[in-house]
Image (tube, rainbow, N blue to C red):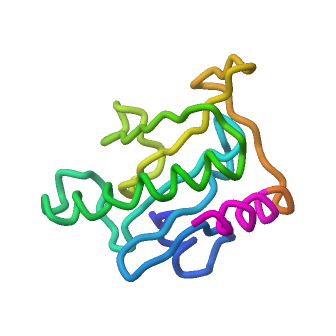
Amino acid sequence: MTCIFCDILSGDREGHFLYEDENHVAFLDKYPIDHGHSLVIPRNHHERITEMTSENVGKLFSIVPKIAKAILEATGADAFSLAQNNGREAKQIIPHVHIHIIPRYKNKGTIWTKREISKSEELEELSKKIKNFI
């Protein structure tokens, strides 16, 4: 079985990138819970966070505030949620470590399980807007 996130990293699948460094990337979720929903992942494939060293987990989480701040500024969101799941029973859909950054809006009653399929053009436009704030 191939990993969708590894395919995005290799360019075999489309990804709308917000941030990249030597060891991490952030990109928009194609099936967002809300406008601006993004994922932060390590470039190296690890299915669960328990497979990573503590140092690498710390480095991964250390870039989340910078990306979350840019998402808030670009989308006008009022707040955000973080999620990080490990294993199928924990609702981890893609078996590659990832952190969800989910913008929240005062005037919307977002439901965790409701997702929409975004159009590529919308994701591209939003990714450019968020990149401007990083």
Q: Is residue 24 magenta?
A: no
**Residue 120 point in image, percent of width and height:** 81, 61
**Residue, x 62% and y 32% (percent of image)?**
78
Q: How many marks?
A: 0
Left or right relative to 132: residue 55: left
Q: Is residue 133 magenta?
A: yes
**Residue 100 point in image, percent of width and height:** 48, 45
**Residue 23 point in image, percent of width and height:** 35, 76
Q: Which residues are magenta?
A: 123-134
Q: Which residue is most to the left?
A: 54
Q: Quadrant of the N terminus?
A: bottom left
**Residue, x 34% and y 68% (percent of image)?**
45
Left or right relative to 126: residue 11: left
**Residue 121 point in image, percent of width and height:** 86, 62
Q: Main secondary structure of the magenta part?
A: helix
Left or right relative to 8: residue 60: left
Q: Quadrant of the C terminus?
A: bottom right
**Residue, x 60% and y 66% (percent of image)?**
18
Which of the 4 image quarters holds residue 106?
Answer: top right
The answer to whether residue 88 is above or below residue 64 is above
Left or right relative to 12: residue 40: left
The answer to whether residue 124 is above or below residue 28 is below
